[in-house]
Image (tube, rainbow, N blue to C red):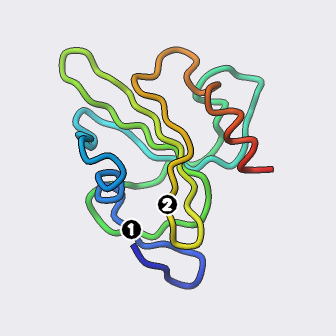
Amino acid sequence: MYLINGDKMILNWEKEMKNIDPDISFRATGGWLKTIERLDKSVKNGYSLVGDFVKSGDFDIDYDDGLYLDCNKEGKKKSQQDYRLFRLKDGKLRLLDMIIDGKGSWALEFWDTIENEIN
């Protein structure tokens, strides 16, 4: 990864994820990446994490500093959804929190961490 224009970051999301978790089967059965800009506590699911979906994968793209939530889906018979919350700042991608095989109201488990990061 490297910085451009002082506040944008060029990185390959798949490579970054594999650096953090070498055993990950990146997007084996799907997944997504989104920014997290704020919380909407009027809902008690993933929609409470407000932000925009962004491209990610095995290609270089520029990312702004901020919070990112990655959902990686693995498993063929029984799909498992793993969620990882990241902070991208000053050229560094830092894992803040993660949920392996999230179910039901998984998003609520991130609320405290997100509040600490956006306040």
109 and 28: which is toward the camera? 109
Decide: marks 2, 1 in contact (CB < 8 A)?
A: yes
Dot 1 crowding, Cα within 10 Å, few <14, some 14–19, many 20+: many
Q: Give the vertical position of 14 relative to 47 (above or below).
A: below
Q: Quadrant of the N terminus?
A: bottom left
Instruction: Return the residue at label 1.
Output: 11
Residue 43 coordinates in the image, percent (x, y): 70, 22
100 lies left or right of 34 = left
Q: Secondary structure at mark 2?
A: strand
On screen, 96 above or below 111? below
Q: Report the mark closest to the observer, 2 or 1.
A: 2
| Residue type of the residue flagged with mark 2 | Leu
Residue with the mark numbered 2: 93
Crowding near pointer 2: few (<14 within 10 Å), some, many (20+)?
many
Q: Is residue 101 left or right of residue 52?
A: left
Q: Looking at the picture, does residue 2 appear above or below residue 54?
A: below
Kindly report the distance in space between the C-alpha atoms of the residues bearing marks 2 and 1: 10 Å
As helix, strand or loop, the secondary structure at mark 1 comes to: strand
Q: Is residue 61 left or right of residue 18?
A: right
Residue 74 is tagged as none
Residue at 52% x, 72% y is: 91
Q: Position of residue 98 (x, y in %)?
A: 49, 36
Quick check: 56 left or right of 104?
A: left
Q: Which residue lies at the image location 43% right of the left edge and 78% below the top edge? A: 2
Percent across and percent down for residue 17 are: 35, 51
